[in-house]
Amino acid sequence: MKYINFGRTGMRVSELCFGTLAFGNQQEWNIDISKSKPIVKKAIDLGINFFDTANAYSAGRSEEITGELLREYRSDIVLSTKVYEPMGDGPNERGLSRLSIMQQIEKSLNRLKTDYIDIYWAHRWDYNTPIDQTLVAFDDLVHQGKVRYIGASSMYAWQLAKALWTSDKLGLVRYEGIQNHYNLVYREEEREMIPLCRDMGLAINPWSPLGRGFLTGKYKRGEKIDSPRYRSDHWLKDRYFLDEDFDVLDQILEIASDKDVQPSQIALAWVRQKGTIPIVGTSKLEHVESAVESLDINLTDDDMKRLEVPYKPHIILGHH
């Protein structure tokens, strides 16, 4: 495993980030702690030191499982979680107000069984709260020692630019990374967000690098789809499966066959060679092993071109 800088922070993280969206009990494709334990152990044994969760995943259960399984490794890992999504029926149990942030950080720390979060992400842009209020609250958490760094997730480039400008203007800590929707069949972030992050030195930590499993090749063009993930995950069925998406997948399958590797490994190699730290969420042991093995794949310029040529612009997805 190689370790790289997380943006301009100097903090070193593995080339892959382990995502824990599947941990919990809200969806039929989620897994409980007994099934999660060997997967996390394997990830650590393979050198992954960067783990990501969110307070909203399975209504907090993902954080509980993540905290329990990583407790003994806490000083050796980089742990991140998020705030914004609803965590109850109360009007203040959501969003990025100072009240919400200060309440939710304590609950996340308790569930994660830790005294601090390495990266605390704003899960979405809060249209109801001024960005300066959010950033002052985050700045206070950093100075209190409860958070090391802050990051942003799933927003427009103009929103990130506004947040960075506000931090600079007020002398506050700033977002040091972005978690964005980015993969071979969703590349709209290349227009503005990724160039902005490159210019400002932010780490790029994309979610769904395998398109919710679409880029693994398990779905066939024209085939009736009936899987637990597809039935219950609107993020999957509402975002992919266009004809042009299958055109990209065809290239993935051909290159994977030529190199005698798995399609998922080609998709991960591509997004990694774009200078990002992809989040790999998995519910199976072999998927962790496959993801780490993908780090040994080096795509040629011709490979990259073949993968990219079939792409057609998509409507903007994943910001709300």
Image (cartoon, helix red, strand yellow):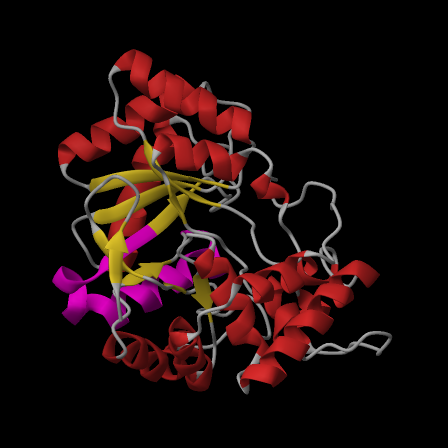
Indicate the position of residue 286 as horizontal and vertical percent values: 44, 86
Which of the image's four quarters has the C terminus?
A: top right
Which quadrant of the view contains residue 97? top left
User: In front: 311, or 128?
Assistant: 311
Above or below, comparing residue 31 to residue 195 in the picture: below
Q: Is residue 110 visible?
A: no
Q: Which residues are magenta?
A: 55-80
Prevalent SS, magenta region: helix
- The residue sitting at 45% across, 66% down in the picture is 280
The question of residue 277 being in magenta is answered with no
User: In front: 129, or 74?
Assistant: 74
Indicate the position of residue 303 as horizontal and vertical percent values: 58, 67
- The residue sitting at 73% across, 72% down in the picture is 250
- The residue sitting at 29% across, 31% down in the picture is 138
Which of the image's four quarters has the N terminus?
A: bottom left
Outermost residue, right direction?
Answer: 222
Q: For this view, does 155 lie left or right of residue 275?
A: right
User: In front: 300, or 2?
Assistant: 300
Above or below, comparing residue 284 to residue 174 in the picture: below
Q: For this view, does 98 lie left or right of residue 237?
A: left
- The residue sitting at 33% across, 84% down in the picture is 38
Which quadrant of the view contains residue 112? bottom left
Q: For this view, does 4 lie left or right of residue 288?
A: left
User: In front: 232, or 256?
Assistant: 256
The question of residue 64 being in magenta is answered with yes
Indicate the position of residue 203 as horizontal and vertical percent values: 36, 44
